[in-house]
Structures are given as C-alpha cells and as structure tokens.
Image: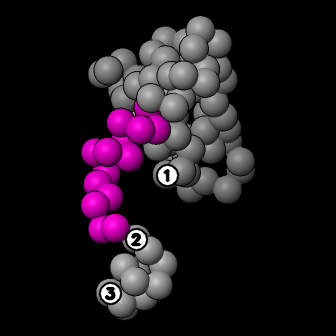
Amino acid sequence: MANFTYHVAGCRGDWTMAAFRAQAIGAFARRLRAAAVVCGCPRGVDSAVAAALVHEAIGDALTCIFVDTGLLRLGEPSRSCACSAAITTSR
C-alpha cells in the first residue's frame, strides 16, 4: 500500500486536516467575498461540514435552511434544527 501511495500515485504524506481546513476556508472566503449565501442542509454530515466551513469563511452572510427530506426518524427534524442553531450561534 505504501509503495502505491508514495511511489506510484506520487502522494507526499504531508496532508493534515488542519491544513485542509485552512485551505478550504480561504478558498470559500476568496470565492464568495461579500456574497449572501444560502445552504440547504438535509442533516447529512457532508452538508453540515460544508456549512461549517463556509460559515467560518463568511460568517453571518451564510443562511442555512434545514431541508426535511421526509426520510428522517421521528423527532429528528426538531433535534436537527436545535443542533444547527447551537452550532451557528456558538461561533
């Protein structure tokens, strides 16, 4: 596995989550600048992470809208909204 990763695929092995986070936030900040942004969040991890990174980049210019897909468990929509509100207000 290491042979393929480093020698065949050419990966360097110096990737860190902190570096990715900083790079992603910087890219969002440059692209979105003073734009007002709406993010539809259907409670998935992917949309929550994207919303958190964009919020770090542009702050209150981001408006998150919870999207109830109809596929959630009983009570999950209300818990999701409360959790999203807590994350947004804690920043």
Amino acid at circle 1? Val
Foreground: 48 or 58? 58
Residue marked by disc 3: 2
Residue marked by disc 2: 11
Magenta stretch in the rendered image: 12-25
> Label 1: how many residues lie within 10 Å, few (<14), some (14-19) or many (20+)?
few
- Residue 91 in the image, given as x and y percentages of width and height: 32, 20
> Label 2: how many residues lie within 10 Å, few (<14), some (14-19) or many (20+)?
few
Q: Earlier in the sequence, mark 2 or mark 1?
A: 2
- Residue 60 in the image, given as x and y percentages of width and height: 49, 12
Q: Earlier in the sequence, mark 3 or mark 1?
A: 3
What is the total number of numbered labels drawn onto the structure image? 3
Asked whether, in this view, residue 51 is left or right of residue 16, the answer is right
Give the distance between the C-alpha atoms of the residues marked 3 and 1, in whole angstroms. Answer: 29 Å
Q: Are marks 3 and 1 in contact (CB under 8 Å)?
A: no
Amino acid at circle 2? Cys
Asked whether, in this view, residue 42 is left or right of residue 9, the answer is right
- Residue 19 in the image, given as x and y percentages of width and height: 32, 45
**Given the current orientation, which residue lies at the most extreme right position?**
70
Q: Mark 3 falls on what kind of element?
A: helix
Q: Main secondary structure of the magenta part?
A: helix
Q: Earlier in the sequence, mark 3 or mark 2?
A: 3
Is 30 located above or below residue 18 in the figure?
Answer: above
Q: Is residue 20 magenta?
A: yes
Amino acid at circle 3? Ala
Q: Is residue 22 magenta?
A: yes
Give the distance between the C-alpha atoms of the residues marked 3 and 2, in whole angstroms. Answer: 10 Å
Q: Quadrant of residue 64?
A: top right
Residue marked by disc 1: 45
